[in-house]
Image: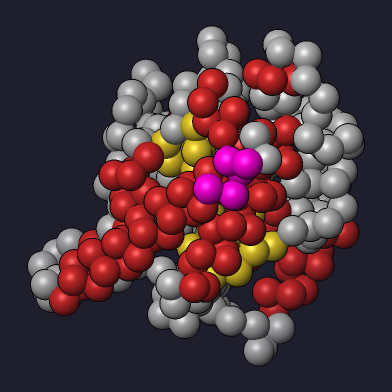
Amino acid sequence: MLNPMRRIAWLLGGLSLLALPVSAAGLMELLDSMKPAAPERLQRQLPAVPLSPGRGKNWVGVRMPKEGTSILVLAGHADSQRMYGSGTPGWAVDVGGAAPMQSGMTDELYWNLRTARAVVAEGKKQGLDISFYDPGVRTIRNVQDPRTNWSVGQKHAAQGGYVVEIHYDAYSPHGIGAGVIPAVAFGFSVLDEALAKEFGAYPYDYRGMLGAPRRGVSMLEIGMLEGSLEQGLRDPRRRKATLDTIAKRVVSALREGLEQGTSLKAICPPTTGIAAYCR
Ligand SMILES: [Zn+2]
C-alpha cells in the first residue's frame, strides 16, 4: 500500500504520461529521457501570458547557462521552407523585384544561415564554446521531428545550455525591427539580457509567446530585411564586412553576458531568498 504522498506523486506521474502527445517522436523522447545515462533535464516552466499583451522589455535575464554546455546557434526557418513560416522574402525580392539569393529558400533563411555561421566562426575565434546546428533538410512539417531546430534546441536548453536562433524581420510596415525575443521555458538568461542591451528587446509574451521561446530557444532579430542593412548584405563588395560587423556585435554581447552572469553569481549568496537569480 502506497502512502498518500507517494500515491499522489505516482498519480501525477501517470497523468503527465497521459498528457504526452501520442507520436513516434514523443515516444522516442520519452524512451530517451528514461535512459540511465541521459544528462540531467530541466523542467519547462512557462509563466502565464499577461492578460494584456506585454510591451517592450517585460523580463529580466539572470539565469547563467550550465557550465560546460556550449552556446548553440540556429538559423531561423532552416527546416520550414516551402511551407507556412518560411521567413520573409525581404524588400529587395518582394518589392524591388530582385532575384532571391538562392532558389528554394527565402532571403531571410539565406541570411540567417550566413549570419549564424559568421557568429559561430567569430565566437570560436574569440574563445567561446559555440556551435551551429543546421537540420539540412529544408522542409520538415512535423515540429516534433527530432531533427528540427526546435527539437534540437529544446534538448540543448533542457540540459541547461543556451540556444539562440538568428532571424531577420520583415520589411516595414510588416516588421518591427531588431531585438531579442527571450527564451522562456527554463528561465530568462543573462545572455538574452546582454543581447537586449545591444539589439533591444521584445516582450517575452510577444504574439502570445512564440514556439521557440516556449521551447527554451531565444530568437534574435538582427533587423528588418530592407534599406541599408539589406543592401549591405546583398552587395558582394560589402557583404563580408556587413556579416562581420553583425557577428562581432552578437559575440561581444554574448561574452558580456557570460561575464556579467559570473559576477552576478559571485555576489549572490544562496540565502538571499532570490535563488532563481543565483542558479
Ligand atoms: Zn524569421
Q: Nearer the viewer, residue 278 or 86?
A: 86
Magenta part of the chain: 237-241
174 vs 67, left or right, is right
Q: Is residue 61 magenta?
A: no
Which residue is the extreme one toward the front? 237
Q: Is residue 276 left or right of residue 78?
A: left
Residue 12 is situated, as x and y percent measured from the top left of the image, at 56, 61
Q: Main secondary structure of the magenta part?
A: helix
Residue at 87%, 59% (x, y): give it.
24
Q: In the rendered view of the protein, which quadrant contains the C terminus?
A: bottom left
Residue ID at (14%, 71%): 268
The percent position of residue 253, horizontal first and vertical second, equals 35, 55
Viewer can see residue 224? no
Quadrant in the picture for residue 92: top right
Name the one closer to the observer, 31 or 230: 230
**Vertical side of 76 occupied by 247: above or below:** below
Does the magenta portion include 239?
A: yes
Determine if residue 223 is in view. yes
Q: Is residue 50 above or below residue 94?
A: below
- At x 38%, y 32%, the residue is 203
Q: Residue at x 78, y 35 (%)?
A: 101
Residue 72 rendering spot, x and y as whole percentages: 57, 64
